[in-house]
Every structure is written in C-alpha cells, then in structure tokens.
C-alpha cells in the first residue's frame, strides 16, 4: 500500500510523487514514484528498505529531484532526511539532520532569493520537547545556517510550506491544547530563518485534534488554509489576511475592514447548523433560537460583501447557492438588529 504526501509536476509533463510504501511484512518505507502525464508509472523506488521512513516533499532540480522526509536510525531514532536522486531515481547524495532524540520529518522548498539552495523545515526534540528547526542547505545538502527556536510546539504539520514575496516562507506547526490535543499554529519566517510573526487561530476546539493540510496564497496577499478536525464537521477552511489574522466571526479580520461598518457579534452567538458543508448548490440552515418577525439571514463573502439577504422564520431555511462561486462564506442570523446565530459554509462545486 502506498500513501502520498507530496507531489510536483515535472518538465516532461509528468509527476513526481513522494510518500510511504507499506507491505504485509514491513511498515512504512521512504518511497518515490515517477509517472507520465497520464499517471502511468515510469519508475518507482523504495529507499532504505530496512529502515522505517517516509517522504513528505519533493521538487525537480536541473539534474533530477530533491526529496525530504524522515528515516529511522538505531542510535538517534527518527531523523530529518534529505536526498537528491537523478532522473531515473538513483541516489546522488543523501544526508540526515537532527539531534540524538526522535525528531519530526522535514519538509523542503527551494529558495527564490538564493538559487540552488533549499529551506528545510522541521521540529527537533531537545530534552523530550519538540522545537521549531529551520535550516538552509546548499545544492549538495551542506548546511548554510540552522536555527532552533526555544519554544515548544506539538509538531510540524504536513501542509507544504509556501514561499513569500520577500524570499521567506510560511509553514504550519501545531501546539497542544489544555487537554493535550493538537491545534494548528501559523508561522512566517524571513529568508534568513527569523520569525516575522506567529498566529494561533482563535476559537479552536480544545477537546479534539484539528489539522490543516494545505496552504494556498490568495490574490489579496493572504492565505487560505484547508484541513480537517475530528468532529461532526470534519472538513474546514480558514482565510487569513497578509498578517496571518483571522477570526471566528466577520468584523474582526483586517481583510474585511475596507469601508465596512458592521459590528462584530458577541462571543455568545449561537452556532448556526449548516448542512451539507461543503455545499454545492443548496444548503439547509438550522438554529435553536426562536425568531421574531423581522429576522434576517445575511451571507457575506470573504471580503465582507453581502451576497444574500432574506427574511427567515421558524428554525430552518433552505438556501440556493448555485449562483455563488467556490469559496468561504459567513452566514449570520439577525433578529431586530441583534446577532443571534452565525456559521461558515464552504462552496465547492
């Protein structure tokens, strides 16, 4: 069984895939697969077949591919692992990084400010405490600089780091909630590995794990994050502005502050039940509050623009969303001008 963690397109129109391969007789192994443009396998290789490992990211180079992940060693347990292979998957060089304790797997991305170098992002364990570890390596894996931040994190999340216009990058760590569950933590680094800021997402649940698995840059300079949590509504998306800010209700996010004058709802606003979510054409909204005759439903897009306004009554409403494009929307129920319920819906057709 194969499990894919990282994929990149190649100059020949095909794909290079990094992941983990398992069989009935062995646990995960560092695995790379090359396909053509139609997804047909051209070659695949399992690396270090006697050691537990996994590949999490991969990029094409001038002569082959560079991949990163983790390999388990007898003396140091799991180490960060980076290797370069040629166009047929043969090893050109390989190196492991980390300390004497079990470290996170690492993710890799090319630097735009220093060609033929790469950022390696991970978490290193010191005295059983995982801490952010950032290094820049040259084209043969040599360390240019390395930094460890003396702050505890849960782990590095699998979302691929994304480069920023100033030559730095953003990535996702996690932190442990008060009940010992994982929640995402967004970090922005400079080209030299210093932190510009870190952001925790407000309102995260503390009684189950939440993960963000992907990062995409948006046209307004912010980011859209997507992932899942272990709840009844597992899939979710988060919109961040250029400074990493977001909120659980419309009005506190700086991306929604251009010429807007509405007042944020109070923290005790009831949760609006939205099914299905993500939605395609129609959605059913339900709420527990008893509404008066002047109750309204308002739906905003991520810029704060009202895209739907209608009167509602009772405890549910069926809404046609067919005319709206894909994206994240905020739904709010107001009664006599007061916010009584709110929620988010993702449209994905």
Image (tube, helix red, strand yellow):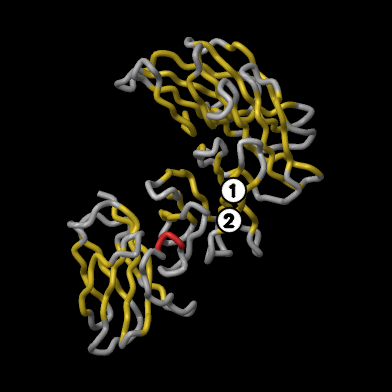
Tag 1 or tag 2, which sits nearer the N-term? 1
Q: Position of residue 285 (x, y in %)?
A: 28, 70
| Real-space Cα separation, disc 2 to disc 1, in angstroms | 6 Å
**Number of numbered discs overlaid on the protein picture:** 2
Residue drawn at (72%, 37%), measured in percent from left and top? 147
* Residue density around tag 1, few if under 14, some if 14–19, many if 20 or more, within 10 Å: some
Query: Dot 1 corresponds to which residue?
Result: 187
Residue 203 is situated, as x and y percent measured from the top left of the image, at 52, 66
Q: Residues within 10 Å of mark 2 (few under 14, many from 20)?
A: some
Question: Could you tell whether 183 is left or right of 104 in the image?
Answer: left
Horizontally, residue 53 falls left or right of residue 325, namely right
**Whole-percent x and y of residue 298?**
28, 72
Rendered image quadrant of residue 74: top right
Mark 2–mark 1 CB contact (< 8 Å)? yes
Which quadrant holds residue 338? Answer: bottom left
Up-down relation of residue 106 to residue 153 (above or below): above
Q: In this view, does 248 lie above or below 213?
A: below
Q: Is mark 2 on a helix, strand or loop?
A: strand
């Amino acid at each position: 069984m194969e499990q894919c963690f990282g994929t990149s397109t190649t100059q020949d129109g095909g794909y290079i895939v990094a992941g983990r391969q398992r069989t009935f007789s062995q646990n995960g192994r560092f695995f790379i697969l090359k396909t053509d443009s139609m997804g047909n396998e051209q070659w695949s290789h399992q690396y270090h077949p006697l050691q537990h490992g996994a590949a999490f990211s991969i990029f094409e180079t001038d002569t082959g591919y560079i991949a990163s992940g983790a390999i388990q060693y007898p003396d140091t347990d799991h180490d960060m692992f980076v290797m370069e292979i040629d166009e047929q998957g043969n090893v050109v060089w390989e190196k492991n990084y980390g300390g004497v304790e079990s470290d996170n797997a690492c993710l890799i991305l090319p630097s735009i400010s220093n060609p033929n170098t790469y950022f390696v992002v991970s978490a290193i364990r010191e005295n059983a405490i995982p801490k952010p570890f950032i290094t820049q390596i040259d084209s043969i894996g040599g360390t240019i600089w390395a930094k460890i931040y003396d702050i505890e994190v849960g782990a590095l999340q699998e979302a691929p780091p994304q480069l920023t216009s100033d030559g730095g990058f953003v990535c996702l760590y996690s932190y442990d909630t008060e009940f010992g569950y994982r929640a995402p933590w967004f970090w922005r680094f400079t080209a030299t590995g210093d932190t510009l800021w870190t952001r925790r997402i407000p309102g995260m649940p503390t009684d189950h794990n939440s993960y963000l698995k992907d990062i995409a840059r948006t046209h307004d300079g912010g980011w859209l994050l997507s992932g899942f949590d272990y709840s009844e509504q597992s899939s979710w998306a988060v919109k961040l502005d250029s400074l990493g800010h977001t909120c659980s209700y419309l009005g506190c996010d700086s991306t929604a502050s251009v010429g807007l004058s509405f007042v944020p709802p109070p923290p005790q606003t009831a949760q609006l039940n939205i099914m299905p979510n993500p939605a395609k054409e129609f959605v059913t909204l339900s709420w527990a509050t008893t509404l008066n005759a002047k109750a309204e439903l308002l739906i905003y897009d991520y810029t704060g623009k009202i895209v739907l306004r209608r009167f509602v009554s009772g405890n549910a409403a069926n809404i046609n969303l067919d005319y709206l494009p894909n994206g994240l929307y905020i739904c709010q129920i107001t009664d006599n001008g007061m916010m009584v319920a709110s929620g988010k819906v993702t449209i994905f057709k």
